[in-house]
Amino acid sequence: MKLFTVFQNIWSIKELRQRILYTLALLLVYRVGTFVVLPGVVPAALAKASQNRGANDLLGLINVFTGGAFDNAAIFALGVMPYITASIIVQLLGFAVPYFQRLQTKEGESGRKRLNQITRLLTVAITLVQGGSYLQLLRSTPGAVSPNIPDPVFWFSNIIILTAGTVFCMWLGERITDKGIGNGTSLIIQAGIIARLPQAFVFEFQKMFGEGRIILFVVELALLFVVIMATILVIQGIRKIPLQFAKRMVGRSGGSLPTSGARDYLPLKVNSAGVMPIIFAQALMFIPATVYSYLAGDNGQGTGRIHMFNDIYSFGYNLVFFILVVVFTYVYTALMINPTNYAEYLKRSNAFIPGVKPGEATASYIDNIMTRITLPGAVFLGLIGVLPSIAATFGVNQQFALFFGGTTLLIMVGVALDTLQVIESYLLTQKYDGLIKSGRIQGRATQGVQVGQPQ
């Protein structure tokens, strides 16, 4: 009954209803585009090649992110992945290059527009490179390209179509962010991932049913539920640092009385970096796959050990991936969370941590705590990243194993929390009950210097 009341409250808010419908409409447009095949491509041959390839290589993971558009050779085959790569590059440049740092921190709205323009141009450049690699993969697949179309026409036309498709996906994401609900780019990726979930679920059920292991299938679902709950706990987990505000005087001069300092807390997230470290690591792991797709055009000669990094279930791939996730978690947390800014904020707010001197001592105290709580968060992200390989080792279907962890699970959980947080904020501003009876939904966007509610 509570659930129906929440849905009724959501639908009664006109602005929220319009945003949800607008988001669903644009996501439907994206899903339609994932089935529009590039000219000159033979879908039957491509489908046969994808079945033979299976889901064990990195291309299968890319196909999950694009909702099947990659294996369909659709106009949205690259999806928003080039845009995400460009955004990551621009964001990292903001930490290392003074020009980009100035645009991020000092130029205001004009700087943000300039960064968006640079990101879009960089997206086009990355799409041209990745599009060429993708077309090379199609040409190396037997029977995937019609022999009636000349090579120059095939390359020139399809590279333009792929680039236009990625730019259009980028535009859809921006429109959803501005006029829809939630982060548009993340929702597009999530829509592609969820679209592959029913098929993977059916494959796993058929496999277990055929082998007479229905009880084991139920156990798999229970373990998947436990992993999702653990992911939510880590994403929303915080370490509360107690704060106390200095005493203030109230009343008229000559008769002022000191009031006791108010108590509050400073929340530090266990996983301040969110899903970004695993996306960074995944982007780097795409590089060997791109090189491999070019080299494999010569009947696989010259690929050497690089093939190991094209198999997402190999030991070498998962070892490197785990290390990269842990390293990027520390790096991204250090870039995003500045203890000095926290200390200055507390000083300006006339607040202090009991037993810790203001200024450098406070910054050092916060930095030590962040270092300690980041370790379990980093290890957890690393384990989530390699969990699909562990699940596949124990006999889980490779397509279904992808949803046991990795980027797919973190994106689904993180984007769902972000979207629910936006919906809950609309409900609370209209004086409706939130989505949960107690507490607040905390998405990945809940970062930065914050002060909690008084206790």
Image (cartoon, helix red, strand yellow):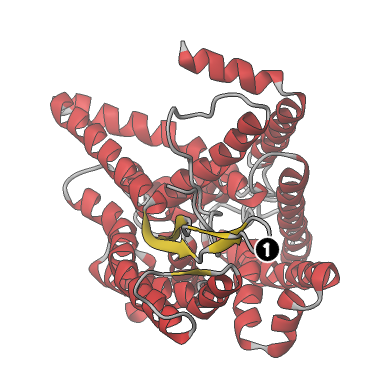
Q: From the viewer's perspective, tell me whether residue 192 is left or right of residue 374.
A: right
From this view, report whether residue 236 is shown above or below residue 448. Answer: above
Q: Position of residue 225 (x, y in %)?
A: 29, 36
Outermost residue toward the front? 254
**Residue 85's quadrant in the figure?**
bottom right
Q: Position of residue 451 (x, y in %)?
A: 52, 57
Give 47 or 126, whichever is nearer the viewer: 126
Q: From the viewer's perspective, tell me whether residue 341 is left or right of residue 243.
A: right
Q: Position of residue 32 (x, y in %)?
A: 68, 35
Q: Secondary structure at mark 1?
A: loop
Residue at the image point whose x is 37% and y is 45% from the top: 232
From this view, report whether residue 194 is shown above or below residue 455. Answer: above
Residue at the image point whose x is 63% and y is 74% from the top: 91
The answer to whether one can see residue 139 in this image is: yes
Give 50 or 75, whichever is nearer the viewer: 75
Three-letter residue code for mark 1: Ser
**Residue 328's quadrant in the figure?**
bottom left
Residue at the image point whose x is 14% and y is 26% from the top: 215
Q: Position of residue 293 (x, y in %)?
A: 50, 69
Outermost residue toward the top? 1
Residue at the image point whose x is 71% and y is 56% from the top: 166
Give 160 or 94, whichever is nearer the viewer: 94
The answer to whether one can see residue 402 in this image is: no
Outermost residue toward the right? 110
Q: Which residue is mark 1?
A: 253
